[in-house]
Amino acid sequence: MKVRTCVCQVLLVALALVAAQEEEVFQNVVEELTVETVVNPETCDITSEMGDTLQIHYTGRLMDGKVIDSSLSRDPLLVELGKRTVISGLEQSLLGVCEGQKIKATIPPHLAYGKRGYPPTIPGDAALVFEVEVVSLSKQTQWQRLVNDVFPLLCLGLVPTLLGLVGLYLYNKANAAQKAGKKKAKDKKSKKK
């Protein structure tokens, strides 16, 4: 009887080790972002691009199926593509989708929370699975494009210009003070004579 119990315990330990190794291998297999369409809308005239605004419902899970977050009990999440309001893997998976489309995205760790994870909910090096429904899609307006594309470039040009102007102002102020100091010294010399 004791021999049977011992053999059963050894088998259980061996099975647990094999299961742990398989889970580790499965976690490490996810190296690329994969996106599959679960539901396609009847018509898809407009697809999402960078700068567009989406309202989505999502459920995020670990690879073992444990739910880490869901918007189903809240209002849809507002995502402006390119603003990095969500993890990069989710943002990438939302490019080229239509209003009404449902997708399933398997996101590798480097496009999710990386080595650090998001304790205590998401462990380090965790691949994630997101099921997403695109509730609405708003295309980027010309004004938004101007603000998103041109304004940052103007700022890049304005910052050095402003710094240069401040530097010029300080240089001129220092020169004026230096000239005033020389003039006072010259006046003192002439008074002594």
Image: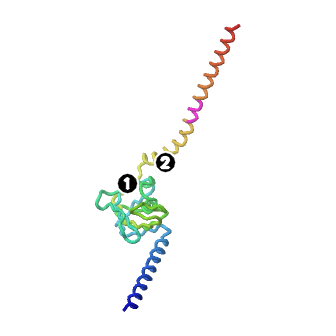
From this view, report whether residue 48 is shown above or below residue 62. Answer: above
Q: Position of residue 71 (x, y in %)?
A: 32, 60
Is residue 101 something that shows in the picture?
no
Give the camera-side residue of 85 and 25. Answer: 25
Disc 1 residue crowd, few under 14, some 14–19, many 20+, Cα 10 Å: some
Residue at (48% x, 44% y) in the render: 151
| Element marked by disc 1 | strand
Classify residue 160 by image quadrant: top right
Earlier residue among tags 2 and 1: 1
Quarter of the picture holding the N terminus: bottom left
Classify residue 187 by image quadrant: top right
Give the camera-side residue of 86 and 97. Answer: 86
Q: Position of residue 57 (x, y in %)?
A: 34, 61
Q: Amino acid at mark 2?
A: Asp
Residue situated furthest front in the rendering: 2
Name the residue carrying label 2: 149
Residue situated furthest right in the rendering: 193
Residue at (58% x, 35% y) in the render: 164
Q: Which residues are magenta?
A: 163-168
Name the residue carrying label 1: 138
Magenta part mainly helix, strand or loop? helix
